[in-house]
Amino acid sequence: MAKAQPPDSVAETKQALAAASYLADESAALVSFLAQRLGKPILVEGPAGVGKTELAKALSRASGRELIRLQCYEGLDEAKALYEWNYRKQLLRIQAGGESGWDEVHGDIFSEEFLLERPLMQAIASPEPVVLLIDEIDKTDQEFEAMLLELLSDFQITIPELGQVAATSMPIVVLTSNNSRELTEALKRRCLYLWLDYPELEREMEIVRLHTPDLSETLTRRLVEVVRMVRALDLKKPPSIAETIDWARTLLLMGAEDIDRETFEQSMSIIVKHRTDIDLVAERVGMKLSAPTQAG
Amino acid sequence: MSPTASPYGPRAETGPPGITAKLLGFCEELRGEGVAVGTSEILDAFAALEQVPWESRDDFREALAATIAKSQEDRRVFELLFERWFFRAAEAEAIEREVSEQGQRHEGAERLDIDELREQIRQAIVEGNDGEMRDLARLAIAAFGRQGEGSGVVGVDVQRIRRTLELSAGTQPQGEATDGAADRPPIDRDQLNRFERHLRRELERDLIERTETLPPARPLAELDRALPTSPTQDLAAVHRAVSQMKRRLATLGHEQRGRRRSQVVDVRRTMRASLETGGVPMHLRYRPKRPRRPEIYVLCDVSTSVTSASVFFLSVLHALHDSFRKLRSFVFIERISEVTEIFEHERDFREIARRVSSEGGVADVSGYTDYGRVWLEFLTEISDDLDPRSTVIVLGDARTNGREPHAEVFAQVSERAGRLFWLNPEPKLYWNYGDSVMAAYERHCDGAFECWTTRHLENFVNVVAGGVPAAE
């Protein structure tokens, strides 16, 4: 496994990711490779549950770097993402050194000792190179995006009292977005863009096999085909890859040999999770499956 | 070709000569199609291309796409242009040098008999091997072209060759060719499409070679890519615009309360926090602010005068229902009827359209819109629920068919509701002509917008959020 050393070829990246049990397709491997060579952030977009977050985790495993994760949500602000002054400690410092003069104290309490590092700051200040995952960036507001720009292009953070803090090591930055709103041009400009979609039949089969090697070949194919059928419907929440894997595990536990109507209806709730969706799927997909055989 | 200066220092020419100019030309063309390609992106593209092998077509394309095309829409345009630009470049070169591969092609075709070809193609499609498919597509064209069957129209030829090869998605082909091969895996539709793309490409190539001219330089009309072609695609765009609107509406309340949002001290949590500092409440705790949930009332005209727009309107409603929990929707023609239930329980869009028209019960006798009556009914039925936090959105053309508009009732609705917007499916030019009484209503709206495409919808969302309307 490559240790903080950028890979030499796309194939090598792909292999490293596969070793970290992530089967990347061509474009995902290429973009991960470019990101490491060029030191640019990756912006991953795509529907929920296609392995956007997983890609970052796999990158961290493959490159042997630590993963620092910033989960975005509405109302996330600098204090929670970048840094905060530990002012209880600052107060104590002022009280403890009652004799010292203003200048001394002033210089003292705004030093790194009193800084509380939040994920972004941590990623920058870490002596070892890390993988920084900024998850669901589309959940934040545009102001937050603007704040990220300095970090993403120059890998530095400006703290008014301290000046600029530049990165000691180059992190691999992965931003994910569910495309619930358009990100700003400025942000996109600084990133490599990767669109992840549901994998093709063969690749999804490989993924399932990787996680449940005990499931028989024919059943795996059948399972993935059914999942693809379900995805083709207009559902509130189409089944993700993780749910496909969960379902495969369930079938294994149930000891199912084929997916017939009965098995499907029993275990359907693992891949379909909305009341209205369940009705629709039962009607459209359940009917297509063969009725349970007498022996089974 | 002199090396281009860049922030990374003078760049040595890598890859084939003249590629720099070629790429710049490609980016220029992308810009012409409305993709925002900045200088920094072009520099990135060059930096990326230094890292991948030039010979690999897929790597080359993906590396370019990752640095230049930054959204799905951009990617679509990119794909179309990439094919045409780089493929055409090769062809132009060939014509210039008067290179022709005619002879070689025929040779290959003669050695193959048709059944074998059929089998090979089927195999290649199932395996999804791009290179193989391309070669076989050329063979197939040569084989069929030789029988003098070329119609000269690419699309027609593609379909004919596909039929002759007995390729169809999903089902087993019937007939003699399937004898003894019943266990063949059925062909995936996507795979078949890929093969068809290869066929199309090779046919285009053939055409260029025969006529020795290139296809028109600007094949991508606005219509070709931007406008939604199928209802499902349209629906997706509408959903996107609406989910943007959701975010904007949700945060709008805060902005209205000014920059310094007043906060309420949470006494219990402050006291608890003060334990750390020996009972001195040094750190004030505030009640968390929860974004308020917008309450939305949507009134949608479904009469015949807006037939063309009503599919669009219904899809807007459909998308709104997915995004907002506190949403009540109404359809009206002569009377008003609440259809919130239908939207909440039905997922399939066509089914919704059917149920709205059959169960809505909004048409009386004439089937002409009666806005005046609609306002009266709306006010009596619903006005008690309206409060300053609610938003009312009207989708309609304001054509009263000569009936009393009751603008004063509309004014009352407007007064009770926090905000009131009107989306009109007609161009602004037609407002107030004929029986349209838009002006009477517009006075009482917080905003009236023309709206018949998703672009207008996005514009509306922008204005609602207090931004500037996108330039037409």
Image (tube, coloured by chain):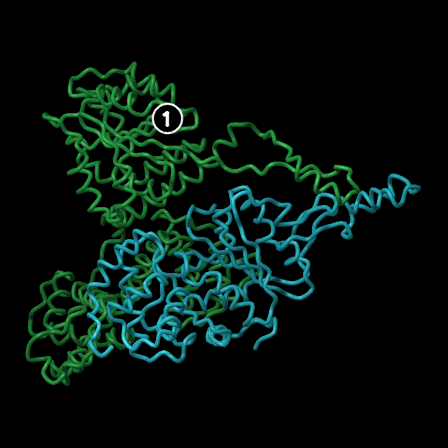
Chain colours: A cyan, B green
The amino acid beneath tag 1 is Asp
* Residue that label 1 marks: B385
Q: Nearer the viewer, residue B62 or B380?
A: B380
Residue B23 image offset from top left, x and y in percent: 41, 59
Task: Give the quadrant of the C terminus of chain B.
Answer: top left
Q: Is residue B324 left or right of residue A190?
A: left
**Label 1 lies in what chain?**
B
Relative to residue B181, is residue B15 depicted above or below? above
Residue found at x 58% / y 75%? A2
Residue B375 image offset from top left, x and y in percent: 26, 21
- Residue lying farthest right? A99
Residue found at x 17% / y 35%? B307
Q: Nearer the viewer, residue A85 or B377?
A: B377
Quarter location, residue A87:
top right
Q: Secondary structure at mark 1?
A: helix
Task: Give the quadrant of the N terminus of chain B.
Answer: bottom left
Q: Is residue B301 left or right of residue B29?
A: left
Residue found at x 36% / y 66%? A199
Residue A175 image offset from top left, x and y in percent: 51, 56
Relative to residue A68, is residue B254 depicted above or below? above
Q: Residues within 10 Å of mark 1 (few under 14, many from 20)?
A: few
Taking the image as drawn, is residue B29 in sight?
A: no
Taking the image as drawn, is residue A266 in sight?
A: yes
Quarter location, residue B66:
bottom left
Q: Nearer the viewer, residue A115 or B295?
A: B295
Q: Nearer the viewer, residue A31 or A80?
A: A80
Residue B82 image offset from top left, x and y in percent: 33, 60
Q: Is residue B219 left or right of residue B387?
A: left
Relative to residue B354, is residue A12 depicted above or below? below
